[in-house]
Image: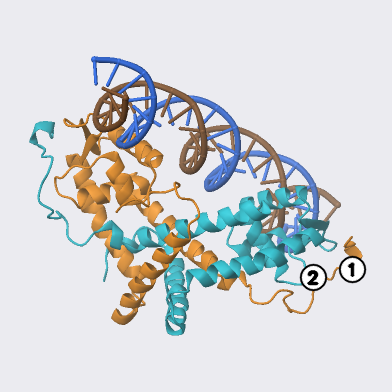
Chain colours: A orange, B cyan, C blue, D brown
Amino acid sequence: MLPSSTRRKTASRTATVPGLNLSHFLPYRVSVLSNTISQTVARLYEKRFHITIPEWRIIAVLGGLGNETLSAGEIAAATAMDKVQVSRAISRMLGSELILREAGDTDRRKALLTLTAKGLEIYSEIAPLALAYEAQLTSALDADEMQQLNLLLSKLQTKADELTTAPESRITRVE
Amino acid sequence: MLPSSTRRKTASRTATVPGLNLSHFLPYRVSVLSNTISQTVARLYEKRFHITIPEWRIIAVLGGLGNETLSAGEIAAATAMDKVQVSRAISRMLGSELILREAGDTDRRKALLTLTAKGLEIYSEIAPLALAYEAQLTSALDADEMQQLNLLLSKLQTKADELTTAPESRITRVE
DNA sequence: CCAATCTAGTTTCATTTGAAACTGTTGCAA
DNA sequence: TTGCAACAGTTTCAAATGAAACTAGATTGG
C-alpha cells in the first residue's frame, strides 16, 4: 500500500480534512506560548537565584503571605502543583535554607512552612523582576486588552477544568 | 539566624511586597491553563489512538499537507518541537507504521516523511475530535471574544518570542 | 480502646526529558 | 581534490517526572 513512487515532493496546498491547522489550534497555541514564557522565566530564576519554577512558586505564595505558615498540602493547592512536586521542591529548599519547617502542634503530620530570611530576601528581589517580565510581556496590550485577557483566561480555565476527564489527577478540590 | 520561636502560626494577610499574587501572575496562569488543556488532550489521544502529543502534532502537520513530504527538520519547525523530540516521535511512529520514511535523493541527510494509510486514517478520525474539544473549550466565548483571543495570543507570542533571546540585561527594569 | 481507615507527606522505580556528544552527509574554500 | 565547517538526525547519559507504594500520624466505628 501507498508505494513511494506515487508521492510528490510538492503538491497543491489543499488540505485533505478541512479546518485543522496546527498553528491555529488553540491547545497548540497555548502550549507553545506557555513553553516560550516558562523557558524565559525559568532561565531568569535559575541564572539569578538558582531556583526552579516550583521553588519560585513556593517562594511566591509564602512570600506573599507575610509571616503566615502553610502546610505542604496548602502549598500544593495554592500553586497547582501535585504533592510530589511540592515535596521535592521543599526538600531542595530546606537544603538551600530558603524555607523553615516546623512540625505542627495540633497535627504532627502537617509541617508548617515559612520562608527563612534568605528566602524572604530572594522573594523581595525576584518579585519585582517577575512583575517586570510580566509588564514587558503585556506591554503591547492596552488597558482594555488587558482586561479582556484576564477575562478570557478565566473563562478558558473554567471550561478547561470542566472538561478534564481525570477526577483525581490534580488539585481541583480547592473549594 | 531566624530562630523558629520568632515565628507565628497565624498572622494578618498583609503582603510584604505589593502586587505579586501568584494566581494573577500571567506566566503562572498560562502555565496552569496549558497544563490543564494538555492533560485532557493527551488523555484523549492516548486512550483512543495510542499516540502522544508529539505524535499527534506530526500527524496534524503531515495530514494537513495532503501528499506533500516534510523532513524531520521541517516538522520540528512546524510543530515547535526540538529535533530530539521529533526524532523520537518519528521512530515510535515508524514502529507503529503511522509514517513512512524515504531517503531524500538530492540530500541524503534529509529523510522525506509522509503518513501511511494507517496514519492518514488516524488523522481523519482524530482531527474532528480535536476540533470538537477546541469548540467545547471556547464554547463560553462569543465571536467577538474569539477574535480577541486570537489577537491577544498572537501579541503575547510575539512579545514572548522577543523576550526569549534577551540577555540578562533586559528584564531588569520595566520602563 | 483498638482495629480499620484515612490523610499528609516521602520514597521508589520506571519512564521521559534535555543537553551534549556523536554519526553520517553536504557544502565550501584553499 | 582534500580538509574543514556546517548541517540533519540519532544516541547517550544524567536529571526530571509521575504513578504507585510506603511511612507515620490522625480519626472513627464498634
* Picture quadrant where residue B55 is located: bottom right
Picture quarter with the C terminus of chain B? bottom left
Q: Can residue B24 be seen in this view?
A: yes
**Amino acid type shown at disc 1:** Thr
Mark 2: which secondary structure? loop
**Amino acid type shown at disc 2:** Asn
Residue B59 falls left or right of residue B174: right
| Residue that appears at 36% across and 68% down | A154
Labels 1 and 2 positioned on one and the same chain = no
For disc 1, the chain is A
Residue A174: x and y in percent read 31, 52
Residue B135: x and y in percent read 53, 72
Residue A83: x and y in percent read 37, 40
Q: Residue furthest bottom?
A: B144
Q: Is residue B172 visible?
A: no
Task: Answer above or below: position of A74 versus A16.
Answer: above
| Residue that appears at 26% across and 51% down | A60
For disc 2, the chain is B
| Residue that appears at 41% across and 58% down | B31
Q: To which residue does mark 1 refer?
A: A6
> Spatial distance from mark 1 to mark 2, Cα to Cα?
9 Å
Q: Where residue A88 is drawn, which disc sits there?
A: none
Task: Answer above or below: position of A18 versus B90.
Answer: below
Q: How crowded is mark 1: few (under 14 residues within 10 Å), some or many (20 or more)?
A: few
Q: To which residue does mark 2 refer?
A: B67
Residue C5 falls left or right of residue B24: right
| Residue that appears at 17% across and 60% down | B18
Task: Answer above or below: position of A53 versus B152.
Answer: above
Mark 1: which secondary structure? helix
Residue A48 falls left or right of residue B11: right
